[in-house]
């Protein structure tokens, strides 16, 4: 029997390979749906405005598309996660460049001709920006959301509602039980089952998406 984890890893690898074809709209939509919030969140937390962050998302997607034909997905050589971070990093730098000399990230005349690395260091020095730490935090959020979406699809709607009210909305167990006219024990069981499914799915996706 096929190992589900192996299937997920191959699915992500297959998606990346399919992205080499710009005309494969379904694959690109899948990629966008998976990663746009990650890129947007990192851009905003880096100090960009919402509009600038939206531009980062768009330009990162374009940049990925341009580089994808030459991209070789080799997990031993380096993760896709790190590669995508670099794509996002340069687009964030571009946005700070566009602000002009009066912007905080371009406060000195010397930065007019600075390299991307020098601009990034200047931003970090002034804002204590740790882009890799921000990326890691947003990456975990992305994985968690993807896991919850996948788990939710496999659950009976009522079971998810029980879990959602008890865990996410913090209703009392007896209140949830009364609402659905079920024993309190079923509320605890739903929480345990969904929590375990989430843990397993997060672990799988964390490896598959890396």
Image: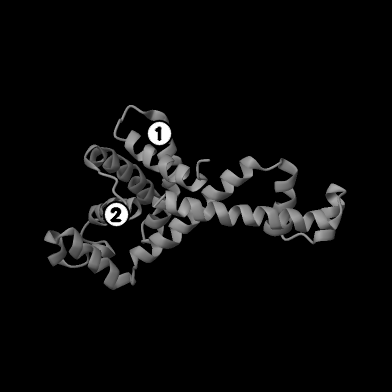
**Alpha-carbon span between mark 2 and mark 1:** 24 Å
Q: Residues within 10 Å of mark 2 (few under 14, many from 20)?
A: few
The residue lying at 30 percent from left, 43 percent from top is 59
Query: Is residue 103 visible to us here?
Result: yes
Q: Nearer the viewer, mark 2 or mark 1?
A: 2
Q: Which sits in the foreground, 72 or 58?
A: 72
- Kindly check if marks 2 and 1 are in contact, taking CB atoms under 8 A apart as contact: no
Query: Measuring 39% from the left and 29% from the top, which residue is drawn there?
Result: 25
Secondary structure at numbered mark 1: helix
The picture places residue 200, in percent across and down from the top left corner, at 56, 54
- Location of residue 107 by image quarter: bottom left
Left or right: where does residue 44 sit relative to residue 89? right
Of callouts 2 and 1, the N-terminal one:
1
Residue shown at the point (80%, 60%) measured from the top left: 173
Label of residue 27 in the image? 1
Q: Is residue 195 above or below residue 152?
A: below
Q: Give residue 135's position: percent from left, percent from top.
A: 39, 60
Q: Nearer the viewer, residue 82 or 63?
A: 82
Q: Position of residue 146 (x, y in %)?
A: 52, 48
Q: Is residue 4 above or below residue 163?
A: above
**Secondary-structure class at tag 2:** loop
Nearer to us in this view, 92 or 5? 5
Residue 70, above or below 163: above
Q: Which residue is at 58% across, 49% downward?
A: 148
**Mark sitting on residue 76:** 2
Q: Using residue 104 as the reference point, say whether residue 157 is left or right of it.
A: right
State the image quarter where residue 167 is shown.
bottom right
Percent across and percent down for residue 163 are 71, 53
């Amino acid at each position: 029997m096929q190992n589900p984890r192996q299937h997920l890893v191959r699915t992500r690898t297959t998606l990346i390979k399919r992205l080499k074809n710009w005309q494969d709209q379904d694959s690109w939509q899948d990629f966008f749906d998976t990663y746009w919030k990650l890129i947007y969140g990192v851009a905003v937390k880096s100090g960009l405005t919402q509009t600038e962050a939206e531009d980062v998302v768009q330009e990162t997607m374009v940049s990925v598309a341009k580089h994808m034909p030459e991209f070789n997905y080799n997990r031993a050589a380096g993760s896709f996660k790190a590669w995508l971070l670099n794509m996002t990093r340069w687009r964030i730098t571009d946005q700070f460049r566009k602000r002009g000399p009066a912007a905080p990230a371009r406060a000195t005349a010397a930065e007019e001709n600075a390299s991307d690395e020098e601009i990034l260091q200047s931003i970090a020095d002034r804002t204590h920006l740790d882009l890799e730490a921000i990326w890691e935090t947003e990456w975990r959020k992305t994985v968690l959301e993807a896991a919850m979406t996948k788990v939710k699809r496999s659950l009976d709607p009522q079971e998810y509602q029980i879990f959602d009210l008890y865990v996410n909305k913090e209703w009392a167990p007896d209140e949830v039980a009364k609402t659905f006219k079920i024993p309190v024990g079923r509320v605890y069981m739903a929480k345990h089952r969904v929590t375990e499914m989430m843990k397993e799915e997060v672990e799988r996706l964390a490896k598959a998406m890396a």
